[in-house]
Image (cartoon, rainbow, N blue to C red):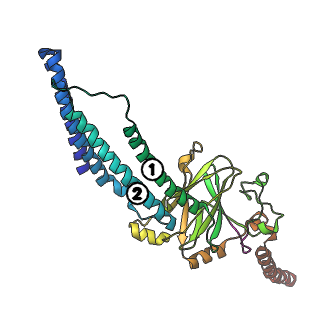
Amino acid sequence: MSLYLSIAIIALIFIVIFQIAKASEYVSVLKGEEASRKQNNKINGALMIVFLVLGFVGVYVCNEYLFDKTLLAQEAASVQGEKVDQMIWVTLAITGIVFIITQILLFWFAYKYQEKDNRKAFFFAHSTKLELIWTAIPAITLTVLVIFGLRNWFFFTGEPPKNAMVVEVTGKQFGWIFRYPGKDAVFGKKYYKNIDPATNSVGIVWDDKLAQDDILTEQTMYVVKGQPVKLIIGSRDVIHDVGLSHFRLKMDAVPGIPTTMWFTPKFTTAEMREKTGNPNFAYEISCDQMCGNGHYSMKGVIEVVTQEEYDLWMAKQKAQYLVAFPEKDPEAAKAADESGKLAAPADSTAKAAVAKM
């Protein structure tokens, strides 16, 4: 309610200012052009101060009402995300200070140095000193920010710790495919011409022994709290972008060109639900690159769990090779043999009963 009231007050102020401006036009007609120009200068100078004050009030009001709805209000969910947040806050502090100073000077100068009969403007064509100041200071500031950004970039995209788990992320229109290495901890080969949406969504080469224990899942990726995760990212159609907003990371998914990044989750999904007070909270993986008419729906879920929960989940997964070739699944064959053995006595009993009749 207070938000609507604030908007109504701001709108009313602008209406009043507009009416004052219209009234000044009528006065100018009555007083003549020279007197009208001087009066307009005074009004415009005063309005500059009014706009300055209203602008800062508007920034404050927007921050009060909208900040909690941004992800910056939440703690970064990864160790690497802390560095990104730190970089964002430093950038906002520097640019915010510059913005405030320049806006105050801009509007104050427009008010203070308005036209007067006893004032003459001073013009100069060139000042080496001024040009050095307004070129060197921004250049040095931006260079420092870029250096910090590159340092973090090389850290996120460099080699992860040796204990990092590895997950392959493949984007498609309009969803995500996740591949985990099997017990051998090595991914098998894949070839795009082997892609079969039903049983082989990433084109695994089945003849490769290393590929026969790889596990595929779609839309939901499981990772472990506190364990580094290396993502090997690709796409099977157009350019996508892996956006991990809660972890403060993103990376392009390019067809034929694998990209990598790694992060360390800080909180399980259950812990984040408690921290946010939202029982439906879920870590989101989204596409941050316009990729077609279904781009808006290209979202997945990242489940951050404990090591025990991850081990239980992984134990329930079946290698994609056995999904594609169920006849080669030893457990399925064993179950079939057992069902056959149970069926045999039943058949013999039935035949004996028929013989007695």
On the image, which quarter does residue 322 sit in?
bottom right
Q: Main secondary structure of the magenta part?
A: loop
The image position of residue 253, as x and y in percent, is 63, 52
- Above or below, 138 against 190 in this view is above
Kind of residue at disc 2: Val
- The answer to whether 173 appears left or right of 70 in the picture is right
Which segment did they paint magenta? 179-186
Please report contact status of discs 2 and 1: CB closer than 8 Å, yes or no.
Answer: no
Name the front one of labels 2 and 1.
1
Q: Which mark is residue 90?
A: 2
Q: What distance separates the C-alpha of mark 2 from that of mark 1?
A: 15 Å
- Residue positioned 81% across, 81% down in the render: 341
- Residue positioned 50% across, 68% down in the render: 79
Q: Which mark is residue 140?
A: 1
- Residue positioned 47% across, 60% down in the render: 84
- Above or below, 349 against 243 in this view is below
On the image, which quarter does residue 54 sit in?
top left
- Residue positioned 43% across, 61% down in the render: 86
Kind of residue at disc 1: Ile
Q: Which mark is residue 17?
A: none
Q: How many neighbours does mark 1 have within 10 angstroms: few (below 14), some (14-19), or many (20 or more)?
A: few
